Amino acid sequence: MQIKKDKIPLDQIIKMILREKTVLSILMKELIEEYNPYSLNEIEQCIKPQGDVPLHSRMTSGHRNENNEDYRSIYFDSLVYASLPQDHGKIAMIINLEAQGILKGKSHVLSRGNYYTSRNISMQIGKLFDHGQYDDIVKVVSIWIVFNAPLYKQGSINRYRMREEHVLGNVCEDEKYFDKQEIIVLYLGYKENESVSSNVLRILLDEGMTVAKKKEELRKYDFELTESLEEEVEEMCDYSVYLEQKYMEKGLKRGIEQGIEQGIEQGIEQGIEQGIEQGIEQGIEQGICSSLCSLMENMKINLQEAMKLLNVPESEYEQYSKMLNVKE
């Protein structure tokens, strides 16, 4: 498979998948109570994707806006305004989907979820409700899809929401006045479970599964890939191959570099060892030569007699004769 030079980053592909109405509708139907009674087709008609919506702008260096200020915008992965079929297009809910690689990064996923829902409420001022008209606040739901969760959490779904608790007495208030924020966390696993939405996401976001295999697996849940969703899934598969090749090349390059480094190190070590060995040998030879000369001078004997006295092996007689330039 030929890989494009400029690949869309994997996190951007996941964002595009989470913005697909077919994906959103199956999650909304299963996870959000207000949409449980409706068909997937009815829910799709209620979805209004908002595109790239800034969560906030963070001040940082290297980026300039029209006021010459430094900033970097942080965007929601997927943000949609959703109505209910009976409300004829009136916004009833804001739904935010976020993909989280690990359960704990700089902040826990639930802490981030609280911040995201709070931002989605404050962003409504002047757009969906006027300041002071708090009864008009639209409910916000933040759905977090967690990859690489601990094994004991994989395949689980947790919901966090505000509920009325009667500490004293039994006074009841209308739920619409306090049920304004909800966080739902899906801990994706590698095995099939009872949740259709979890299984669909597990298959769609599996980087190692081919498109053909994904289509086959998704049919078990009556889920068909739309044309645009299929393109994004193919892009994900291409990207996984691209990464595999990239890291293979990187690994090969690093292997060659390490081989060269090890070769140099071994060469230096061997050179030192050889130098020491040669130095010791030369020192011994020079010591023997010095001793032979002393014997010949003091005892008035020839070289052969001196070598016999020093127990020099006969095989080395010629060597020391050459070194001392003495004929046997």
Image (tube, rainbow, N blue to C red):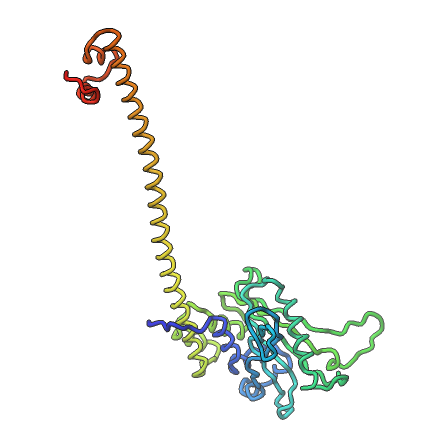
Q: Quadrant of the C terminus?
A: top left
Kindly indicate the quadrant of the structure image that contains residue 114: bottom right
Between 63 and 77, the one nearer to me in the picture: 63
Residue furthest to the right: 169
Q: Is residue 147 above or below residue 78?
A: above
State the residue at coordinates (40%, 74%): 211
Residue furthest to the bottom: 88
Between 322 and 191, the one nearer to me in the picture: 322
In-image side of 139 versus 233 (left or right): right
Image coordinates for residue 178, horizontal then vertical, percent: 74, 78
Q: Is residue 254 above or below residue 309?
A: below
In-image side of 283 versus 203 (left or right): left
Q: Quadrant of the N terminus?
A: bottom left
State the residue at coordinates (66%, 76%): 119
Residue furthest to the left: 328
State the residue at coordinates (46%, 69%): 206
